[in-house]
Every structure is written in C-alpha cells, then in structure tokens.
Image (spheres, grey):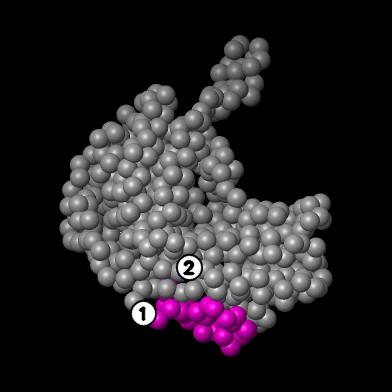
Amino acid sequence: MNDFALLIDGALVPGSTELPVIDPATEQTFSTVPAASPEQLDRAVAAAGAAHPSWAATPVDERRRIVSQIADTIAQHRQELAGILVREQGKPLAAAFGEVDTAVEYIRYFAGLTLEPEVIDDSELRRVEIHRVPVGVIGIIVPWNFPLLLLAFKLPAALLAGNTMVVKPAPTTPAATLHLGRLIAGIVPAGVVNIVSGGPELGPHLSAHPGLQKVSLTGSTETGKKVMAAAAERLTRVTLELGGNDPAIVLPDVDVEEVAEKVFHAAFGNSGQICRAIKRIYVHADIYDRFCDALAARAANAIVGNGMEPGTQLGPVQNQAQFDRIKEILADAESAGKVMPGGGVVDGPGYFVRPTIVRDVDESSRLVVEEQFGPVVPVMPYTDIDDVVTRANDSEFGLAASVWSTDIDAATAIAHRISAGTVWVNKHSDRTPDVPIAGAKQSGIGTELGVLGLLEYTQIKVINVARR
C-alpha cells in the first residue's frame, strides 16, 4: 500500500517529502504517502484556475456524466477503498463498506440534480431570470472521521455546479482520498480535480490562498474559526460544517430497552467520532437508573477491536492526539461523575477506548461542555421539561439534537425549542443526500447536501432584459 501519488493538473506526481500513515489499531505505520510542498499546492491551485473557464463552459449534461462516472468508478473499486479506510481510519470493515457505498449514493444524487434558471418576471416590460453560475476554484478540506463520505458531500456538488477544486484530506487519513485521485485521474479533465496531501501546515496555506474563491471545510469549530479568519482577508466564501455537542432528551414514557438500543448506536457509531452523534443524554428521573443500566449493558457487550477482525463492532479512536484528549476527558469525568462498569481505555497497542457511560455528571465538566468526539458519553437526569430544554441549549454548539417519546406531538413541540440545525424525533443521525445539513451557533456556516447544498457552490447571476 505505497502506490500513492498527488493529483495535480491531471498528472499523478510524487510529493516533496513523505508522510507516514498510522494504523490506529496497531500504532504502526502501514503506508507512506506523498506530502505536498507549498509550491506544489500553489501549482494545484493554478491548475484549477486554468481549468476553470473550460469546465464552467462544459454543458451541465456532460458534467453530470462525469460525476456519474466517478460514482461508478468508486463502486467498482469498493473493496480496495474499504480496505484502505479500515487501515487508516480504524473503523470496522462493514462500516468501511458502508462509507464507500454511501459515498456512491450521494455522488449519484448530486449527478441527478439540475441548475435550471428561475424566471421571476416574464411580463410585457421585462424578463428577469436568476441563473446559478460557478463560484470558481474551491478549496475542499476533509476531516479524518469519514474521509470519503464527507468528500462526497462536497466534490459532486462543486463539480456539477461547474467549479474546479483542490482537495486536501486530513493528515492522518490521506490514503483513500489519494487512491480515489488515482482512480479518477483519467475521468475528469486535467486540473478540474486536484488532490494534495500533507502535514497540518498545508491546510492554513490552502485556506488563505489568493487563488481560491471558496473554501469548504468539515472540521472542528476551532479549525473553522481559523479558516474563516484566513478567508476574511479576501472575502473568500466559506461553507463550514463544524463541531457539535448534540443533546438527546428522553421522556419518561419511552420503552427503555428499545430507546436505549437506538440511543446507544447513535452515540457510539464510528466510536463516537461523528459530528452529529449524540454527545449528551438527558433522561427523566423516573426511568434514569434503568436507562443508565441499559446503556451500560450494551457498552459492556460491545465488541471493540481491529476493524479487519470478523465481528468487530467498534474500532479505535483514529489518532494519537484524539486518543490522548479522550483520556484526559475521561480522567476529568471520573472525578465529576460515576463511570459505569465495562468502559474505559483498553491496555495494549492501538488507540482503543471501550464505549463508556458516565452518569450523574457535573455539568461543568469537560465531558458535558466540550465536544468529546469519542466513545465516552455523559447521562444526566432531569424532572422538568423547561429546565432540560435550557440545559440542552446551554452550549456554544448547535449542530443537531433529538427528542424521544411515545407522544410524537409533545416531542415535536420540544424539538421546536431546541437551538440546533437539525432536531430529530424518535431517531438520531437519520441522513439522506436530499436533506440539508446546517449548523446553528458555532456549529457552522452555510449548508451541505440537498438542493441547498448544491446552491452553496454557485453564484447568483440575475439577467434582467427590457422588452420595451
């Protein structure tokens, strides 16, 4: 697994140096990938700029054909892409196949959209049309939790809209994205899609680059602030899908075992490394003890291990820095609440943390206030709806939330009171490509997915024609 290259101006090229890729299940280097120099990044941006006029002038049907061909190519190579994902990201093989297949689904969704002009006046005096034209060169920065899926949120929409781009995967998960570049190098015209990997210094250079007209980032709120500050110098457009500290409110009328099962999977999928995972659980006092026990039983029975091993349900935390942070948060939680049996850090090689339930937590603790982004989740009791809504909203984040009850009307009424871009009722993390994602507060700016997500990659152009 060392046949990786940068994709710059249609050519597969080596980097100026190399970057080791660590398997989080073993803490061993499983491959090396090219690391681009700032000069190579400049070349990639220049290539995207040179390719933009012809790509923007390419008929939409042809752009749609190429986007569809990218989806077909990923589907044909799902086995190798999934295998790379397991090795670099850590997720179980079944989940890796799920990521690849969902990426294909999302790319095909965008390939089916249109960008027809909207006529807002067609009178004797004038005809006024709103056209959606490309923004230009897009910098796409993708995080390490879903390298291919989150790229599929951005790349097909940007391509269909007529933009060119430079893609930068996370330093710890560059391999699958680089392999994708090899697969599509002969599909997209030279310079339309460029893919460069490198260390943490590459992202700031890209987000501040004067050759970009837009930056699209999925990442932490702190990273989003840095990208926005860099973009402000030239008023470069941004779409920022950022952190979340998503609350779940469980009402006393639920079936405890049924809802605990759903909440557990929504909290610990991908080992808790999901922006819109449940990260705080508020349970009514009448069922609090039973619900905590039900969650803890599922945590204790979860199979945690190497993603390549049959039966593995949850893999490791993805990287050393995040692993160390989770250990710090867990140590703080041990003094701020009660850690239920069965959780905690796993001894031995690999960044393994078992799914961990912490009950009776002081709400000023790091586990409650921060986005943990890992397999440690607090559970807290409440008795009053107004109080728990206030507590759920007491966060700088506002990405998503959920409310659970047999009374759908009551739960929906509570959902309307939650400050978040998405609030689910009796489910969590339900996501399809046609439903937009938008964060409230410090969870982001702009929209991804759906028609609104496509429009993020366009500029409004009004054609106003006098008829007399």
In which quadrant of the rendered view does residue 404 lie?
bottom right
Residue 105 image offset from top left, x and y in percent: 47, 40
Please indicate whether residue 308 sits to the left or right of residue 122 in the image. left
Q: Does any portion of residue 21 appear in the rendered image?
A: yes
Q: Which residues are magenta?
A: 321-348
In which quadrant of the rendered view does residue 466 lie?
top right
User: The N terminus appears in which quarter of the rendering?
Assistant: bottom left
| Front position in the image: 82 or 46 | 82
| Front position in the image: 427 or 307 | 307
Please indicate whether residue 433 sits to the left or right of residue 142 in the image. right
Q: CA distance from mark 1 to mark 2?
A: 16 Å
Residue 248 image offset from top left, x and y in percent: 67, 64
Question: Mark 1 or 2, which is nearer the eye?
Answer: 2
| Front position in the image: 344 or 330 | 344
Please indicate whether residue 77 sits to the left or right of residue 463 in the image. left
Residue 464 image offset from top left, x and y in percent: 56, 22
Q: Is 208 situated above or below 120? A: below
User: Quick one: label 1 or label 2, which is nearer the N terminus?
Assistant: 2
Residue on which the image places disc 1: 348
Q: Which mark is residue 303?
A: 2
Q: Is 394 situated above or below 113? A: below
Q: Residue at x 26, y 39 (%)?
A: 185
SS of the residue under disc 1? loop
Q: Residue at x 54, y 84 (%)?
A: 332
- Tell me if residue 345 is in the magenta stretch: yes
Q: Amino acid at mark 2?
A: Ile
